[in-house]
Amino acid sequence: MQIDQKREIRFSDETMATVQKIIKRYPEGRQKSALIPVLHIAQAEFDGWLSPAVMDYVASIIGIQSIEVYEVASFYSMFNMKPVGKCLIEVCRTSSCWLMGAEDVVKHIENKLKIKDGETSADGQFTLKTVECLGSCGTAPMMQVGADYYENLTLEKVDSLLDQWKVEGKRSRYC
Amino acid sequence: MGKKLLLEHIDVPGINTLSVYRSKGGYTALDKALKTMTPDAVVEEVKTSGLRGRGGAGFPTGMKWSFLAKPEGVPRYVVCNADESEPGTFKDRYLMEKIPHLLIEGMIVSGFALGAKSSYIYIRGEYFYVARILEQAIAEAYEAGLLGKNILNSGFDHDCYVQVGAGAYICGEETALLESLEGKRGNPRIKPPFPAVAGLYGCPTVVNNVETIAAVVPIVNMGGAAYAGIGVGKSTGTKLISASGHINKPGVYEIELGVPVEEFIYSDEYCGGIKGDRKLKAVVAGGSSVPILPADLILKTANGEPRLMSYESLADGGFASGTMLGSGGFIVMDESTSIVKNLYTFTRFYHHESCGQCSPCREGTGWMEKILHKILHGHGSISDVDLLWDIQSKIEGKTICPLGDAAAWPVASAIRHFRGEFEEFVRNGHSIKDVRHYYRLNGLPEPAYS
Ligand SMILES: Cc1cc2nc3c(=O)[nH]c(=O)nc-3n(C[C@H](O)[C@H](O)[C@H](O)COP(=O)(O)O)c2cc1C
Ligand code: FES
């Protein structure tokens, strides 16, 4: 996969204004509370993952040590410590989804995209990940792409979504 | 039809907006509390109501509130637990998405009762879009003078913020949640001190589940005594149940506590029976952490009494023959379900979600996952089943937070009630492969299942 090494790590003015607003909502001296919300913003802005350079940048904005950012980023499963495809597909594999056929959904996506769970397609378009319960058990099986939930999946539904995403070069949408 | 206190107006178009919410009586509890009640009077009503925490443990909310330390000059916080990551549970998402102002109103009333000027709603990161809905509702509330300074001219100030997590079940445990809210890893704290004394930023803090805080609104409106009149015994009021699995009508149902389990599963008002008229095999009644029960024990207690959807009735018989109401994540399994495979998904979950602080949980969950994997793939032996039992018994009660117990109970109960199935797997693992979903999803006739 291509990683743009020379890309400047800096929030746009607009994003920076949002970040500063978040930092201000905690009591004086408790700005570290902004870390997780700001990491989400950073991940969305810088290609869907947190490189060391991005984490150092976030540390400098919040005014904490880089190590404090690394230890947090690596704890939470939504933070990607490695590059991911433009479109990150996360399929729930826990009980209720498994009961309703999540394994077949995963197998189907694996076959169709020719990647295994955890892998990224050669063109850098798709990454497939199985994840734990996403609070959508009543509408199982389900998958999440960026901020969007796709529920009550059938293999046909998955097919048509993947076909559409291939054509449009879908990017995960975060909000 | 049972009484609905939280979801009564859920289908009203636009109920997510302030104007429609108000037209249905929204924010009258806030008005009533601020204008006619003292903070302590609100706490008293909550005590009288008998409301118990809806996040899983069922601790009496009024009692928790009365434990809150009130040192002079130290801020207090109300924190709403919207982490909702217990497999099988999706009620908080439904409530926040559909009727966000009910939670916001509950937050402000709770803030008033507890003397908190700030509150945080900690919501799991995957619920991005729900967080946006809440933020929108909060912005509307500020605009209408329901949040901010001098709310409804009462002199009470309150700010409410939404904080997103980033994928960690453990952050639903209240002290891990507070750590996360402080920008740290979600490692649970050693208690005491309890959050009521030293919580967020070391200040006295109350942490309550979304549904608990929402329930404060009808309690203030109708009075604690009237609320206590609903339900059965010490299980007062209504409860949101997330129903999933092999049922005709999965979804979120508000029940009056005390509905018979049989009615809940089979009546068209609720789950509508088992899909394809198959037989019921087992139920996990309160989210992945509670003991699984086979059909006969979920429908009737060991004494032959009808089992009810209440804290006491579900727990009847202890862990030998009962379970827990937990978070109300009701997962139904039909006769074709492999209990061993289902347990594997749970155990893999707990291994994935263990924060890693305590050795019994960190090592034990991974070990149990490996053993189950081995059994599932036809390489297990009878002694592996005994080993599983042994490991779970050495996790339970030996960790800083209850995640260890939550990982142990599903294993213990699956072996207790379905040992034969484990042994069957050990003897002839490959013959029980679970392929039927493939047929179901593709609408093909299912082959006979042996
Ligand atoms: C591992 C673990 C996960 C938990 N997850 C949640 C959760 O997602 N939501 C919740 O409200 N409570 C959860 N709890 C319970 C909380 O620790 C706490 O008891 C609860 O938020 C208190 O609120 P309540 O009294 O209103 O239920 C969890 C507990 C443990 C041990
Ligand atoms: S089990 Fe898949 S969303 Fe809950």
Image (cartoon, grey):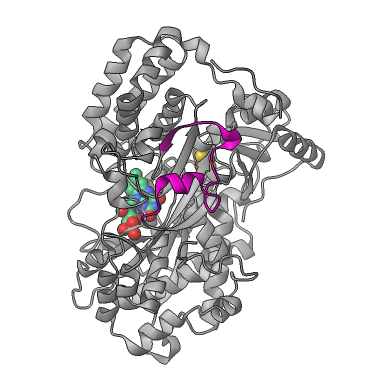
Residue found 32% across the figure and 30% down from its top = B413
Residue B227 rendering spot, x and y as whole percentages: 34, 70
Task: Report the span colored magenta.
Answer: B258-283
Q: Nearer the viewer, residue B274 or B399?
A: B274
Residue B408 rendering spot, x and y as whole percentages: 30, 32
B36 vs A119, left or right, is left
Residue found 59% across the figure and 45% down from its top = A139
Whether B52 is drawn above or below B26: the answer is above
* The quarter of the displayed image where residue A171 is located: top right
Whether A73 is drawn above or below A104: the answer is below
Q: Nearer the viewer, residue B76 or A42?
A: B76
- Residue B277 belongs to the span the image colors magenta: yes
B312 vs B420, left or right, is left
Residue found 52% across the figure and 25% down from its top = B336
Residue furthest bottom in the image:
B153
Residue B381 rendering spot, x and y as whole percentages: 35, 9
B298 vs B22, left or right, is left
B206 vs A108, left or right, is left
Whether B353 is drawn above or below B437: the answer is below
Whether B36 is drawn above or below A21: the answer is below
Residue B4 rendering spot, x and y as whole percentages: 47, 65
Q: Nearer the viewer, residue B102 or B144?
A: B102
The answer to whether residue B228 of the structure is visible from this angle is: yes
- Residue B190 belongs to the span the image colors magenta: no
